[in-house]
Image (cartoon, grey):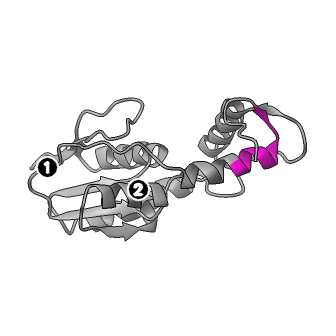
């Protein structure tokens, strides 16, 4: 199959690229993990699970931590740049106009996961960029504070702590 990852692609090409991306090999980097971890939660997607295995962590898988699926917004043979496909899909997600998972659904998923966090003090989460943005936003609403990059970076530990009241 021809790799259209940087060129123009139609809807079928884009969806094939999404599947390849989800299963692709990654560059694994060592990170300085916190010394005290009560629990590690990992997205059930292959990319996150491979990271947890590489880091030799004991973990609990969670479907609540998966990335928001990228979807084609039209079908047919019209060819558009990959970045345009992604931009329009994320815009539709943000505006809650997708047929599949909408922003409101993702926010609810993040809130459901936060309920699990109340059982544990020191937690490591391995997830994905867009979902992490939503999760961090919801954690801040729950009183957590921390410094997070605008663009979530791979192999970066972000620390969120709740102020004791």
Span colored in magenta: 8-16
Q: Residue furthest right?
A: 77
List the residue tagged with mark 1: 34
Question: Where, by quadrant of the figure, is residue 83 drawn?
Answer: top right
Image point 45% across, 54% down: which residue? 47
State whether residue 102 is above or below residue 86: below
Mark 1, Cα crowd under 10 Å, few <14 / some 14-19 / many 20+, is: few
- Give the dominant element type of the magenta stretch: helix, strand or loop: helix
Q: Nearer the viewer, residue 119 or 20?
A: 20
Image point 14% across, 59% down: which residue? 37
Which of marks 2 and 1 precedes in the sequence?
1
Say which element carries label 1: loop
Q: Nearer the viewer, residue 62 or 48?
A: 48
Mark 2, Cα crowd under 10 Å, few <14 / some 14-19 / many 20+, is: many
C-alpha separation, residue under disc 1 versus residue under disc 2: 18 Å
Image point 38% across, 49% down: which residue? 135
State whether residue 30 is above or below residue 110: above
**Residue 89 % position (x, y):** 67, 42
Q: Is residue 24 visible from the viewing direction of this image?
A: yes
Total count of labels: 2
**Residue 100 % position (x, y):** 67, 58
List the residue tagged with mark 2: 48
């Amino acid at each position: 199959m021809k790799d259209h990852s940087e060129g123009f692609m139609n809807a079928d090409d884009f969806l094939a690229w999404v599947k390849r991306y989800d299963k692709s090999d990654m560059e694994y980097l060592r990170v300085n993990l916190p010394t005290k971890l009560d629990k590690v939660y990992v997205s059930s997607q292959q990319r996150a699970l491979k990271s947890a295995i590489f880091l030799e962590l004991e973990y609990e898988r969670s479907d609540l931590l998966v990335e928001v699926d990228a979807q084609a917004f039209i079908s047919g043979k019209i060819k558009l740049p990959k970045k345009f496909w992604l931009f329009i899909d994320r815009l539709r997600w943000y505006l809650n106009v997708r047929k599949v998972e909408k922003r409101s659904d993702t926010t609810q998923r993040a809130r459901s996961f936060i309920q699990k966090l109340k059982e544990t003090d020191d937690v490591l989460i391995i997830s994905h960029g867009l979902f992490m943005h939503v999760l961090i936003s919801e954690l801040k609403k729950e009183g957590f504070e921390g410094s997070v990059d605008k663009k979530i970076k791979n192999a970066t530990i972000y620390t969120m702590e709740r102020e004791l009241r």
